[in-house]
Amino acid sequence: MKNLLLLILLAGALQVTAQQDPIYAQYINNPLAINPAFAGSNNMFNAGLQYRTQWAGIEANPVTVNFNSHMSVYQNRVGLGVQVIQDKIGDTKNTEFSTVYAYKIKLNNASLSFGMQTGFIRYTNNPSALSIRDAGDAAFTQVTETKFNTGAGLLLKSDRYIVGLSVPRLLPATVSQGGQTVELYKQHYYLIGSYVMFVSEKLRFKPAMLLRGTSGSPFSADLNASFTMREFYTAGIFTRNFKTYGLLMQALVKNFRIGYVFELPGSPASSLNFTSHELTLGLSMGVLGMHDKVAKTF
């Protein structure tokens, strides 16, 4: 009960200031989740499923599920895809469906992609999932609304590096709940970057970063560093604002990619001393004659 009360207070704070975008630790494995310009950028067919449970052990903790699929077409110049995201915390749930389009310009040893996504986000609040003392409390009324949204992004990519700038949700939206105006979501800006260094023929070092910002909330920075052995096995560490730390692991099995992240708070003063877990399963393969047959670094 104490955990549920704490979560409700946190959720209430988020509703007053605005719903936050889902958090992903494996953003390098699934850049499409934050940047539509990644669609079709690796010249292959791709499908991925990502599951994240945050603060495991707290009742009704935040849970995010992301499914996406994309591929390159038209001489690998165009990327097309779809994405479905469900983000749930307490009695509220956001379900987002988007179609994704990207156009790629080939440079000397890299490519520059322009991407857009268009779709809708369905907001659902179900008070029956909570134990409410006063059943008629107007602050706990059921709300279901659907909002249109669109997003955009840029991506510069080669076999050695990736740099991207994006705003996946350009249109702020509000809903009315219990006589209050609740910000459903607002613009989040993302800057992503990573570079691969060859330590030896069989060992690669790959640092990466994700900078995230939105008005009214503290600036956030994710930093990670990983080593890849024989192109198949990856292990590394990461931090989010030097307050959360974690371990990341990944394995390539033929055309499949399996990734796992374990997070734990690093501050003794943190009131949320609970772990978080994130699991990804991805498929990359060439299905058209123009597609690459071997998966690339990014």
Image: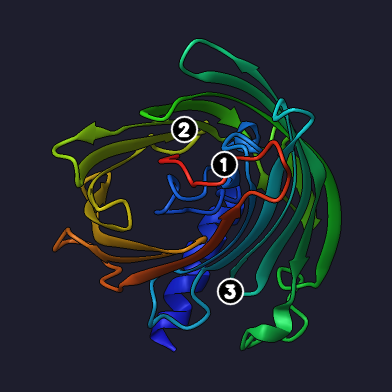
**Element assignment for label 2:** strand
Q: Choose mark 2 or mark 1, whichever is in front.
A: 1
The one of 290 and 141 positioned closer to us in this rendering: 290
Callout 1 amino acid: Ile
2 or 3: tag closer to the N-terminus: 3
- Give percent across and percent down for residue 194: 35, 33
Identify the residue shown where x is 44% and y is 89%: 1
2 or 1: tag closer to the N-terminus: 1
Q: Bin the neighbour count of mark 2 within 10 Å (Cα to Cα): few under 14, some 14-19, many 20 and up.
A: some
Please identify the quadrant where the C terminus is shown. Answer: top left
- Give percent across and percent down for residue 132: 64, 85
The one of 157 and 28 positioned closer to us in this rendering: 157
Spatial distance from mark 2 to mark 1, Cα to Cα?
13 Å
1 or 3: tag closer to the N-terminus: 1
Callout 3 amino acid: Gly
Query: Which disc, if any, is residue 34?
Result: 1
Q: Find disc 2 in the rendering and name its residue.
A: 213
- Give percent across and percent down for residue 96: 74, 55
Q: Find disc 3 in the rendering and name its residue.
A: 90
**Element assignment for label 3:** loop
Q: Bin the neighbour count of mark 3 within 10 Å (Cα to Cα): few under 14, some 14-19, many 20 and up.
A: many
- Give percent across and percent down for residue 292: 58, 40
Q: Would you say residue 179 is visible in this rendering?
A: no
The one of 262 and 90 positioned closer to us in this rendering: 262
Identify the residue shown where x is 80% and y is 54%: 176
Which image quadrant for residue 145?
bottom right
Identify the residue shown where x is 71% and y is 25%: 77
